[in-house]
Image: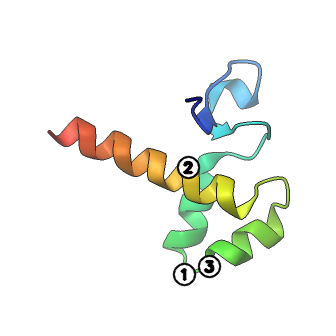
Amino acid sequence: MQSVIIRDQNILGGEPVFRGTRVPFKVLIEYLEGGETLDQFVDQYPSVSRELAIAAIEEARSSLVSQLK
């Protein structure tokens, strides 16, 4: 399965972005930390589907949990 969050030196200097976009993953985290909703994020960044955003959150959670074990 391909990661939905990618790093490519040719895209924003290697900052993690949503696959197929130039939208940094950290922007989603900042939206959520700031009290905005997932729907507000998707409305602002239409190149990121709701499904892609949810998959990215799940992928990040899984990665973090595996590092804590």
Residue assigned mark 1 = 35
- Kind of residue indicated by mark 3: Thr
According to the picture, the residue beneath numbered tag 2 turns out to be 56
Closer to the camera: disc 1 or disc 3?
3
Residue at which label 3 appears? 37
User: Residue at the right extreme?
Assistant: 46
In the current view of this chain or complex, which residue is farthest to the top?
9
Q: Which callout, 1 or 2, points at the residue further toward the start of the chain?
A: 1
Instruction: State how far apart marks 1 and 2 are (Cα).
Output: 18 Å
Query: Disc 2 marks which amino acid?
Result: Ala
User: Who's the residue at 67% across and 45% down the image?
Assistant: 24
In percent of the image, x 71 and y 69: which residue is there? Answer: 41
Q: How far apart are marks 2 and 3 (CA)?
A: 15 Å
Query: Count of labels shown?
Result: 3
Task: Determine whether label 1 and label 2 are within 8 Å by CB.
Answer: no
Quarter occupied by residue 54: bottom right
